[in-house]
């Protein structure tokens, strides 16, 4: 029987490959594909080289639907299928051979794409890590969808006989392709329906094709996506088994029932695993995930920050794993500063607490509400009486601060650990969207972290050994893993995306420029010089419409927002690490926890003054702010900013010492949180440097 199946497979391959149309389609698609990939890579968009090929996957799905359909239809045209029915076992052999042929066609396509892709990678010196990532991506979004499409074509060709099957093939090709939302958006708008959840489930290609490549998270290849493809295959095999069994025997015998039962059982297990609450397919920032997060914080508008002076956190001993979701066991050492019978912490609301215990194992009563958790003791804990609490919790992290088998982005100001006090993890601002709160731990805390995950991880505290970190920090802990690499550049530990591999010289220039700007800012503000130990270049969200980048200060560590565009060295040199952004991060570190418009105004004002002194062209962001107020008809804001601009222009290079003094006084007012537009206007009117 094996020889018969092999002979049938060879016949199917011969019949398919002798078609001129198949060769034309195959070679045309390869030429277009390699052109897209090559142009993207020379444009230093290594990730987009594959994610931008959604149209090719859509074409491939149509081609394999047609191949599967034609395998059945050509036999029916010459009535050879009637001959197969008269031969014992021929129908089964024919179907097995056709299924194997579909997988062979898909494998040949995959190999041809890989050979061409790897050759381009080799000529462009692409880092080796992308070879593995590309292989997995092509299997998930090319090989498996093509196999599934071919099986659908086989089934439709065998079941349907009328000409309407051609229309059905086109409709199915659109529904299961990565362009389904794009093609059907007008239909959804016409009937006022949102079919996005259904279309995402049917889509065999990459979802969120409009999203740019995320340089740390990488290609979206979560376990749930592989399971969905496997579910497609198992369901199709189940239907093919049922169809062939009824065609051969006209009824189901015991062997057929066992085979069908196995396929059905595997399909059910996959379904149960995929639909678990903690299984998510889209974890990278996207329009839909952003809206879900924003909607939560719009509904939970309590932005009050309740600090605690009843106890101090002295140490964290943390064990984390990140496979599909974040699993944490955190031992928290507390020191009460007054007698307490209840303590409150902040923890991101999606991290569901399983239990809270004392170190000896005694269960404690707790209440989790939104982003806060309250733990109660049976008896009062006296002043200075140390106590250890053990929290166990797990869940899917925020779409902006992900943590799963692909990557981890858990910054210091995101409450992924239980932090003393009660406050929302984020706040929603109508004009700027979601924003973080800069609430950090009080005092220096000992941290010990053990990590179980598939990627190399980096942190702002020292690495003690393989997947272990230990150290002290006054500003919390940042964890980051994914497509990252660490290098020492000018005595600074620089953690940045691997996709920046062509920007080595630009990274040197960036670090040198960053250190010089920070030194100048510290001198202007009269601050003590501080050493930069670590710079993380991560895709953190931008929180203000007035800034194209975000910079967060964490003591001697800094986090700078980047995206795929910063792989271009010229963009990295010119547009990353602006003086205004660095200035703003210093204010946020020492000001009230919430963002305020006054922080933007002083930061952009300083950036404008800095550019007049040290850069060839004045920073445009300050003028954009002025123009924005003018276009929105905000007269007071426009007049005050114009007054500041004129004041800086008048005194620059003439009275720099007075300007420094003015900024030092101004920053104290901003940090107090009591400065508004009226106060700012009065501040500049009453004290004109170099006045009359």
Image (cartoon, grey):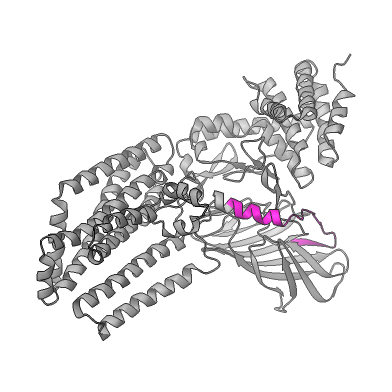
Observer-nearest of 89 and 171: 171
Classify 101 as above or below 624: below
For the N terminus, which image quadrant? bottom left
Observer-nearest of 569 and 74: 74
Q: Is residue 462 left or right of residue 591?
A: left
Classify 635 as above or below 330: above
Q: Is residue 429 visible?
A: yes
Q: Which residue appears farthest toward the bottom when viewing the image?
A: 254
In the rendered structure, does residue 308 fall within the stretch colored magenta? yes
For the C terminus, which image quadrant? top right
Q: Which residue appears farthest toward the top when viewing the image?
A: 692
Residue visible at 22% across and 63% down in the picture: 161
Where residue 282 appears, x then y in whole percent? 51, 56
User: Number of numbered discs present?
Assistant: 0
Where residue 449 appears, x then y in whole percent? 62, 61
Q: Is residue 612 left or right of residue 324?
A: right
Please provide the residue range marked out in magenta.
Answer: 290-314
Residue visible at 87% across and 67% down in the picture: 383
Observer-nearest of 490 and 151: 151
In the rendered structure, does residue 638 fall within the stretch colored magenta? no
Residue 464: which quarter of the image? bottom right
Residue visible at 16% across and 52% down in the picture: 17
Residue visible at 37% across and 52% down in the picture: 174
Q: Is residue 107 visible?
A: no
Q: Is residue 178 left or right of residue 565?
A: left
Where residue 215 appears, x then y in whole percent? 50, 45
Where residue 49 appears, x then y in whole percent? 39, 42
């Amino acid at each position: 029987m094996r020889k018969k199946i092999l002979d049938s497979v060879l016949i199917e391959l011969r019949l398919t490959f002798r078609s001129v149309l198949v060769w034309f389609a195959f070679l045309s698609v390869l030429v277009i594909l390699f052109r897209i990939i090559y142009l993207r890579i020379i444009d230093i968009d290594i990730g987009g080289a594959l994610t931008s090929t959604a149209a090719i996957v859509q074409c491939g799905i149509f081609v394999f639907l047609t191949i599967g359909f034609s395998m059945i239809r050509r036999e029916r045209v010459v009535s050879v299928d009637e001959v197969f029915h008269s031969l014992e076992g021929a129908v089964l052999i024919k179907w097995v051979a056709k299924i194997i042929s579909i997988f062979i066609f898909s494998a040949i396509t995959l190999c041809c794409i890989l050979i061409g892709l790897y050759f381009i990678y080799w000529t462009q010196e692409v880092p080796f890590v992308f070879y593995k990532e590309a292989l997995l991506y092509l299997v998930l979004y090319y090989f498996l969808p093509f196999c599934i499409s071919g099986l659908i074509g086989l089934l439709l060709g065998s079941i349907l006989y009328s000409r309407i099957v051609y229309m059905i093939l086109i409709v199915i090709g659109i529904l299961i392709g990565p362009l389904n939302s794009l093609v059907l958006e007008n239909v959804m708008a016409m009937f006022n329906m949102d079919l996005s959840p259904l279309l995402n489930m049917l889509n065999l290609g990459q979802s969120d094709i409009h999203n740019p490549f995320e340089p740390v998270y990488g290609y979206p290849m979560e376990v749930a996506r592989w399971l969905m493809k496997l579910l497609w295959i198992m369901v199709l095999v189940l239907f093919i088994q049922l169809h062939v069994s009824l065609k051969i025997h006209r009824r189901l015998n015991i062997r057929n029932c066992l085979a069908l039962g196995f396929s059905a059982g595997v399909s059910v297990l996959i379904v149960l695993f995929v639909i678990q609450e903690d299984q998510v397919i889209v974890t990278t920032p996207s329009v839909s995930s952003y809206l879900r997060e924003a909607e939560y914080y719009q509904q939970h508008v309590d932005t009050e920050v309740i600090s605690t002076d009843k106890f101090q956190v002295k140490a964290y001993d943390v064990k984390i794993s990140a496979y599909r979701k974040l699993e944490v066991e955190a031992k928290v050492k507390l020191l009460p500063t007054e007698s307490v019978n209840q303590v409150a912490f902040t923890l991101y609301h999606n991290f569901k607490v399983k239990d809270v215990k004392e170190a000896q194992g005694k269960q404690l009563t707790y209440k989790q509400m939104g982003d806060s958790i309250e733990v109660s003791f049976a008896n009062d804990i006296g002043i200075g009486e140390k106590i250890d609490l053990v929290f166990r919790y797990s869940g899917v992290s925020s779409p902006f601060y992900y943590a799963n088998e692909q990557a981890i982005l858990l910054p210091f100001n995101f409450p992924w650990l239980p932090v003393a006090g009660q406050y929302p993890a984020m706040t929603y601002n109508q004009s700027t969207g979601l924003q973080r709160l800069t609430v950090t731990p009080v005092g220096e805390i000992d941290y010990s972290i053990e990590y179980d995950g598939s990627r190399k991880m980096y942190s702002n505290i020292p690495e003690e050994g393989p997947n272990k970190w230990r150290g002290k920090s006054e500003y919390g802990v940042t964890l980051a893993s994914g497509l990252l690499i660490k290098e020492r550049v000018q005595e600074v530990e620089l953690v940045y995306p691997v996709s920046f591999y062509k920007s080595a010289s630009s990274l040197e220039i960036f670090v040198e420029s960053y250190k010089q700007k920070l030194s100048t800012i510290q001198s202007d503000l009269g601050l003590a010089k501080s050493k930069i130990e670590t710079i993380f270049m991560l895709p953190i969200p931008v929180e203000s419409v007035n800034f194209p980048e975000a910079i967060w200060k964490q003591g001697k560590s800094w986090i700078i927002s980047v995206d795929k565009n910063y792989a271009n060295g010229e963009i990295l040199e010119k547009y990353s690490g602006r003086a205004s952004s660095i200035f703003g991060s210093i204010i946020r570190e020492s000001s009230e926890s919430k963002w305020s418009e006054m922080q933007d105004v002083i930061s952009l004002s300083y950036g404008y003054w800095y550019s007049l002194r040290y850069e060839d062209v004045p920073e445009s962001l300050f003028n954009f702010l002025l123009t924005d107020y003018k276009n929105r008809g905000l007269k007071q804001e426009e007049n005050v900013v114009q007054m500041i601009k004129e004041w800086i222009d008048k005194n620059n290079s003439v009275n720099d010492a007075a300007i420094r003094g003015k900024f030092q006084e101004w920053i104290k007012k901003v940090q107090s949180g009591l400065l508004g537009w009226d106060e700012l206007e009065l501040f500049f009117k009453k004290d004109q440097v170099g006045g009359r």
